[in-house]
Amino acid sequence: MAAAKKAVLGPLVGAVDQGTSSTRFLVFNSKTAELLSHHQVEIKQEFPKEGWVEQDPKEILQSVYECIEKTCEKLGQLNIDISNIKAIGVSNQRETTVVWDKLTGEPLYNAVVWLDLRTQSTVETLSKRIPGNNNFVKSKTGLPLSTYFSAVKLRWLLDNVRTVQKAVEEDRALFGTIDSWLIWSLTGGINGGVHCTDVTNASRTMLFNIHSLEWDKELCEFFGIPMEILPNVRSSSEIYGLMKAGALEGVPISGCLGDQSAALVGQMCFQDGQAKNTYGTGCFLLCNTGHKCVFSEHGLLTTVAYKLGRDKPVYYALEGSVAIAGAVIRWLRDNLGIIRTSEEIEKLAKEVGTSYGCYFVPAFSGLYAPYWEPSARGIICGLTQFTNKCHIAFAALEAVCFQTREILDAMNRDCGIPLSHLQVDGGMTNNKILMQLQADILYIPVVKPSMPETTALGAAMAAGAAEGVGVWSLDPEDMSAVTMEQFEPQINAEESEIRYSTWKKAVMKSMGWVTSQSPESGDPSIFCSLPLGFFIVSSMVMLIGARYISGVP
């Protein structure tokens, strides 16, 4: 019997989407942007101490190889020839910090995840050294001094991990965010792997000057970081190297974007003033500000949006960052056990259609934008004996929407022109209750593409458009029309404002729970937070008891 004829689809482009919760590999048709196949693997998070969040870099790398192999197998089952895959893009969780040995290829410590809070005392010490009238860190990087960014995580590793210190002394250490670790490993590792990053990921380290687009000597000296361990900074769209193993050996890796920049590209927000909001582990609202750096007066970050080619101009963005969005659903699943799968949250919320006055502030990692308040901790308040797990589930979804409202308000004040609608993407946008709640709380339409994988799409677009690949046109006239689903506000503006003002009251009550000297920590060097998965619950929760949380009358 003759072998089945392979389908001819024209050039294909793959995308590695390495997130905080999972790794995926997706393959797109470069002419239509159609998603042809993908595979996903969940990634473990480790919480070795209070406030610490780590992942195994080797597990992350292995998950990438597994996703690539499984996706290629699925394409084969669809009679799609994988030799049509002409390029691979990489999108990644940003800020997460890895140091490895360039001679052995072994990580020297676990990856310190962006949510990790162990560096709060380092931040407090460093902040005292910044003159009040000259915040050169923020003016050069666009970022506040925070546990969120890579420089302080790297400083902690240099101060506390002897294997890292020794490797630096012996010129064996390499530093990178997840993109750098993956690209170095995929392009050969100890056998000629390319040690690089792109401008979007570099801009999240607090070591990168977003004006000159170079590692900054003054910043490296301030944080005590040896510049020789840093990766080379490249554009977001160029050939970095070739895959050296696996089913796609020889395919160029030619796109690299931090996940939120990738989503901005995938949503085709190429014009000044266009914005998108991504609902993942956290929640991230980015607004393209064109070729100019806009510095926020309302708690937002200034960051590099993308640079799509070595000779192409750089674009900047304002960003509102929320630490906990999808992570609150995972917390309800893994820590409270009130749902078995993340998808069940929608069913529970639908049963009641209201939080019944219950408000949930999931400040597991303190509060990010617009507050930047590390002393905050999560609370559930407004509880009564009537409250059950369905109301808490609804309140958790509302919390994601309220946090988005806060950063959208800040964005509108900074930009001066309110957004008329919100473009959204990310895994949580499959939840229709969440999307309707978001439209109600923002009181503007929420617009969702029918294909929500815009982060991976953005990485694929950058890879396919790279010089030397040239299979994906970024000309707006050549881009396929994207079908959208729109959610309109269904409550009146007054009710929306009442709910939002009550949420703000709850946020105020979440602040000031801990300081770095709090007896809660036991160790003043540790920022007093429990890992994703614990918050301080008000005394009302204790009094009501677990039977109400579990929904038993």
Image (cartoon, rainbow, N blue to C red):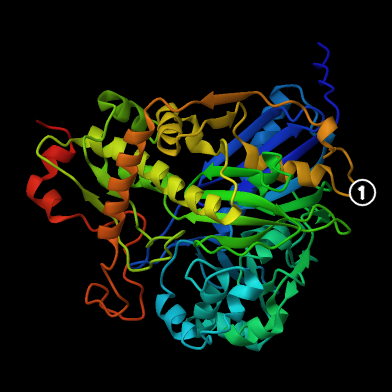
How many marks can you see? Answer: 1
Residue at the extreme right of the image, as rendered: 468
Say whether residue 403 is visible. Answer: yes
The quarter holding residue 548 reads top left
x and y percent of residue 410 in the render?
50, 54
x, y percentage for residue 212? 77, 72
Q: Residue at x 29, y 27 (%)?
A: 353
Q: Hey, which residue is sitting farthest top in the picture?
A: 1
Residue at position x 16%, y 37% from top? 387
Q: Where is the C terminus found, in terms of image quarters? A: top left
Q: Quadrant of the N terminus?
A: top right
- Look at the picture and state if 140 lies above or below 89: below
The residue indicated by pointer 1 is 468
Is 364 located above or below residue 136 in the figure? above
Q: Quadrant of residue 314?
A: bottom right
Amino acid type assigned to the residue bearing label 1 in the image = Gly
Q: Is residue 43 visible?
A: no
Please tell me whether mark 1 sits on a helix, a strand or a loop.
loop
How busy is the neighbourhood of tag 1: few (under 14 within 10 Å), some, or many (20 plus)? few
Q: Position of residue 362 (x, y in %)?
A: 33, 52
- Answer with the quarter of the image where residue 67 lies: top right
Residue 135 drawn above or below residue 1: below
Is 8 on the left or on the right of 210, as rendered?
right
Give whichever of 448, 250 is nearer the camera: 448
Q: Nearer the viewer, residue 477 or 411?
A: 411
Question: Residue 239 in the image: x percent, y percent?
Answer: 84, 54
Q: Is residue 271 left or right of residue 296?
A: right
